[in-house]
Amino acid sequence: MANTEYYPTAVQYSLKDTAYNAVYDAADGSSSNPEWYKAMSELVSNGVKPIFNSISDKICATAWVDLVPKLGFMPNILSIKIALAAGVNTKEDMLMVFASNKEWIDQASFRSALGSFLCIHNTQLLPLFLVIGQEKSTQKLVEIFSNPESAVSFLEENNIINSLD
C-alpha cells in the first residue's frame, strides 16, 4: 500500500503557544485545574483556536473512501476530519489510528486512540473536537455522510467514487 499524503505540509496538532497551554499544565499533559473543562470551553467560546490543519470536504471524503474497504465498514466522517486536522496525513497513519475502530464505544474511544497516536493526553484533543465540530462545513459534511445516498452523491460529484475500486 502506498503511503500517500492527503495534503502537503501537514502540521501536528498543538496547544503550544496558545492560551490552551495554560489549561493543560500538568506534567502528563492533562490539567491541574479542577475547573479545566470550564476554562477550556470558555476559550473555545471566545474563538481561541489550537494549532491544526484546515481540511477540505474532498480530502475527508478521500480518506473515508480509503478506510472503508480496509476497515470493512463506514467510519465516522467527523473522526476522519478530526484526525486529518490533527496532522494524521497518510493512509498508513489513518489505518493505525482507526485500527481498533470496531471496539470503540464513543468519541472518547476515538479521542484516546488519536491521543495515543499523537503521544498527547487525550483531553488535549477536546479543543480540536469542539472547534471542528462547530464549523458549519463540518456539520454539513456529517449530514451528508449520515445518509448513504447523499454520501454516494457527494463522492460521485467530486470524482472520488472511483477510488472504491
Image (tube, rainbow, N blue to C red):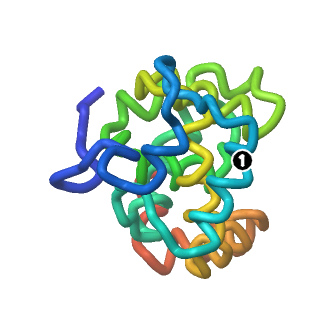
In the image, what residue occupies the spot 52% across and 25% down?
26
Q: Position of residue 146 (x, y in %)?
A: 77, 64
Residue drawn where x is 38% and y is 29% of the image: 93
Circle 1 Cα neighbour tier, 10 Å, few/some/many (<14 / 14–19 / ≥20): some
- Which element type, helix, strand or loop, lies under badge 1? helix
Q: Return the residue at label 1.
A: 37
Q: Quadrant of the N terminus?
A: top left
Q: Is residue 97 above or below residue 48?
A: above
> Number of numbered discs present?
1
Residue 106 occupies quadrant: top right
Residue 84 appears anywhere in the view: yes
**Compared to 99, does 106 lie above or below?**
below
Q: Residue at x 39, y 64 (%)?
A: 55
Image quadrant where residue 71 sits:
top right
Write the residue at 48% across / 50% down.
Answer: 20
Residue 45 horizontal side relative to residue 87, left or right:
right
131 or 85, which lies in front? 131
Given the current orientation, which residue lies at the most extreme right position? 105
**Residue 130 drawn at (x, y percent):** 64, 59
Which percent across, then down, holds residue 64?
53, 50
| Residue 110 spot, x, y in % from top left | 65, 33
Q: Is 106 displayed left or right of 71 in the figure? A: right
Q: Is residue 165 visible?
A: no
Kindly identify the amino acid type of the residue bearing the numbered disc 1.
Answer: Tyr
Observer-nearest residue: 2 or 44? 44
